[in-house]
Image (spheres, grey):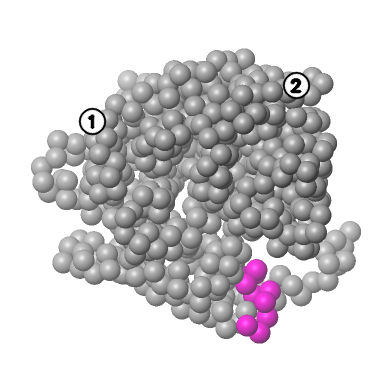
């Protein structure tokens, strides 16, 4: 989309007015992250997204990546944009000063990542993967590894990848086969093939640091026998200087539906030099740092697609004229009224708007939790934030990307047939964002993570922690009579959520398939209630601003009107989800696999 605008005002509403980020940053010791600095960073990020990334989005899709004998060339302008990104200091923003970073909060760089992805999803994949690689090294690397690899990644002269998937295993990593044999000098020789590796090979950086899952020779079977390794594209000496080429080669790149400017690579490791990160056989635990960050990042990609689709559809609906409004002419000087007068077009636009703003609140709330887990001095606060984040990570990943399928589809639908052709960028958004429900763990896998691992695995404790927050908040606004209706709706959903969880636990004790049968509907239910909670909070803030005599009455009124739309038309989607959940597993499991197709 050529005219993408970074949503500065809405982001500031969420960070400052909803979540009190000015105080949050000061409390965590980010003295430099003053409101003035944050606004200056927003302004620069907006310029970069709008003027550098958006103009090469459609051309990047058209041109795609080229592969020639192991060498990948990214679309015209991608490399130059990456150089500008590095020159602007963006890679280092939220990393420690001791490794060359700027020491700013994670939430600041990740909300900017939303804008970069909204402007150009494919391009944003390259720095996005690097961020996860840096987080893994920060959390699990030795000081020497950090000195050699992290500094270059923070600087942006090297980029990173995440190498998990093999042809026979994606979700079920316990089956992976890549092998790492110990070498005499304490390093390893890694052999095997990884597929679907984003940013696995490209022309933007001097070196590529692959973070690779592989097995040691004596490793136990399954996920308990997986270790994590650094495998650089170019070998590096003890001072961090590039020496010669490692035996890592890109075998091919995929031809795919969307994100065509993002190189999705087959990577062959042929006895490649590798260095162990963390403990042997504990690789999956280390990789979870990367995966959790990447899951929030993928949810944010979904949000960014919703934002871009909404912007495109709204501009078109205000301009395109078809028919007269049923309730009387609205554009007497023209031959017809703009399509935004039609209730059904408004239904689509408001669905996009309600998800754009509600989902942003959920995403930024999670970013705030990450800040706390990384920087809070209080052990209790950290533990509380970790619990909430554990529960919300699969929700943010799956709910924001599943709803992006609907919002980007509406992006096309609002345009009618013009949405289906390339010119307007709407079909590209739908294609680009389609992958988001699949990579970083499919929606099905996130749903099992939420219901089986997080909720049942903690005997409901993680859910209790978050629902207590919601209930406490609802109790604090009881005197605000005009919000009782919405607040009661959220509270009764919370009761239903807890009861339903208890009931699923009981049926699953007798039949484990009940968990899988309920899981995706349960996750979507959790998403609608969670976003409903944030809409309630946003409405209360908006009303307060109006009562205080704000000069931005239209902005806050629109928040209240969108909240009404959400409570009337979107939170109510939980009814059909509850019916599906309560129907149990039999309707899914009774048919024999060989009877699915009857001719
Ligand atoms: C463009 C692109 C970029 C990618 N980037 C990377 C990358 O950078 N690094 C990397 O390592 N990988 C990457 N991947 C791989 C991606 O993460 C995997 O494709 C994904 O995890 C799913 O694995 P799979 O494709 O093997 O599907 P499978 O695991 O075979 O799953 C197939 C289907 O079965 C379902 N399923 C499987 N098990 C269960 C279960 N227990 N319960 C319910 N449903 C289940 C899944 O939900 C899915 O619908 C990328 C993929 C693509 C297409």
Name the side, left or right, on which 186 lies relative to 49.
right
Judging depth in this view, the residue of 23 and 469 nearest the camera is 23
The residue identified by callout 2 is 71
The residue identified by callout 1 is 36
Residue 467's place in the image compared with 362, above or below, is below
Residue 422's place in the image compared with 594, above or below, is above
Name the side, left or right, on which 527 lies relative to 213.
left
Image quadrant where one finds the C terminus = bottom right
Q: Evaluate if marks 1 and 2 touch, with contact meaning CB atoms under 8 Å apart.
A: no
Residue at 65% over, 28% down:
237
Label 1: few (<14), some (14–19) or many (≥20) C-alpha neighbours in 10 Å: few
> Does the magenta segment cover residue 514?
yes
Helix, strand or loop under label 2: strand
Name the side, left or right, on which 365 lies relative to 504.
left
Residue at 58% over, 39% down:
145
Judging depth in this view, the residue of 154 and 496 nearest the camera is 154
**Where is residue 510 drawn, in percent x and y?**
66, 84
**Where is residue 320 drawn, in percent x and y?**
45, 26
Q: CA distance from mark 1 to mark 2?
A: 43 Å
Name the side, left or right, on which 286 lies relative to 365.
right
Q: Which mark is residue 232?
A: none
Residue at 57% over, 83% down:
506
**Residue 261 in sight from this viewpoint:** no
Disc tally is 2
**Where is residue 77 drawn, in percent x and y?**
57, 15
Helix, strand or loop under label 1: helix
Residue found at the very far front of the displayed protein: 185
Please provide the residue range marked out in magenta: 509-518
**Magenta part, dominant SS:** helix
Where residue 121 sits, quadrant-wise, is top right
**Where is residue 319 drawn, in percent x and y?**
41, 25
């Amino acid at each position: 989309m050529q005219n993408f605008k970074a949503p500065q005002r809405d982001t500031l509403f969420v960070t400052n007015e909803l979540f009190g980020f000015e105080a949050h940053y000061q409390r965590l010791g980010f003295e430099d992250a003053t409101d003035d600095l944050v606004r200056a960073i927003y302004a620069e990020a907006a310029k970069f997204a709008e003027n550098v990334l958006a103009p090469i989005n459609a051309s990047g899709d058209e041109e795609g990546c080229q592969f020639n004998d192991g060498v990948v060339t990214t679309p015209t302008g991608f490399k130059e944009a990456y150089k500008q990104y590095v020159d602007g200091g963006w890679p280092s923003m939220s990393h420690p000063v001791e490794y060359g970073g700027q020491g700013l909060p994670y939430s600041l760089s990740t909300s900017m990542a939303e804008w970069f992805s909204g402007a150009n999803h494919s391009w944003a994949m390259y720095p996005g993967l690097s961020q996860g690689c840096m987080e893994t090294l920060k959390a699990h690397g030795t000081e020497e590894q950090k000195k050699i690899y992290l500094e270059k990644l923070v600087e942006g002269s090297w980029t990173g990848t995440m190498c998990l998937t093999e042809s026979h295993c994606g979700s079920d990593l316990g089956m992976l086969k890549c092998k790492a044999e110990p070498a005499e000098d304490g390093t390893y020789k890694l052999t095997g093939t990884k597929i679907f590796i984003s940013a696995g090979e490209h022309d933007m950086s001097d070196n590529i640091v692959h973070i690779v899952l592989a097995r040691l020779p004596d490793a136990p079977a399954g996920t308990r026998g997986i270790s994590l390794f650094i495998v650089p594209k170019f070998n590096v000496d003890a001072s961090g200087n590039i020496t010669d080429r490692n035996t890592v080669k890109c075998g091919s790149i995929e031809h795919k539906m969307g994100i065509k400017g993002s190189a999705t690579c087959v990577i062959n490791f042929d006895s490649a030099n590798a260095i162990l990160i963390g403990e042997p056989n504990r690789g999956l635990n280390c990789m979870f740092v990367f995966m959790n960050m990447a899951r929030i990042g993928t949810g944010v990609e979904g949000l960014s697609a919703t934002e871009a689709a909404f912007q495109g559809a709204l501009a078109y609906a205000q301009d395109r004229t078809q028919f007269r409004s049923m309730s009387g002419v609205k554009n007497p000087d023209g031959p017809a009224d703009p399509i935004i007068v039609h209730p059904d077009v408004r239904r689509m636009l408001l669905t996009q708007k309600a998800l754009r703003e509600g989902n942003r609140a959920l995403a930024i709330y999670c970013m705030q939790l990450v800040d706390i887990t990384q920087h809070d001095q209080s052990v209790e606060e950290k533990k509380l934030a970790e619990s909430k984040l554990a529960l919300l990570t699969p929700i943010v990943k799956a709910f924001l990307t599943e709803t992006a399928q609907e919002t980007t589809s509406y992006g096309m639908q609002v345009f009618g047939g013009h949405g289906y052709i390339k010119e307007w960028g709407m079909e590209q958004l739908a294609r680009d964002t389609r992958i988001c429900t699949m990579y970083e763990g499919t929606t099905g896998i996130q749903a099992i993570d939420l219901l089986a691992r997080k909720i049942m695995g903690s005997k409901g404790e993680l859910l209790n922690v978050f629902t207590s927050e919601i209930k406490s908040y609802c109790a604090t606004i009881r005197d605000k009579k005009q919000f009782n209706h919405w607040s009661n709706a959220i509270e009764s959903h919370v009761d239903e959520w807890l009861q339903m969880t208890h009931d699923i636990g009981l049926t699953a004790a007798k039949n484990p398939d009940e968990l899988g049968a309920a899981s995706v509907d349960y996750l979507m239910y959790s998403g609608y209630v969670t976003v409903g909670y944030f809409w309630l909070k946003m409405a209360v803030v908006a009303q307060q601003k109006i009562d205080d005599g704000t000069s931005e009455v239209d902005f806050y009124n629109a928040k209240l009107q969108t909240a009404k739309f959400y409570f009337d038309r979107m939170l109510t989607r939980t009814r059909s989800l509850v019916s599906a959940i309560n129907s149990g597993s039999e309707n899914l499991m009774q048919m024999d696999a060989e009877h699915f197709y009857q001719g």
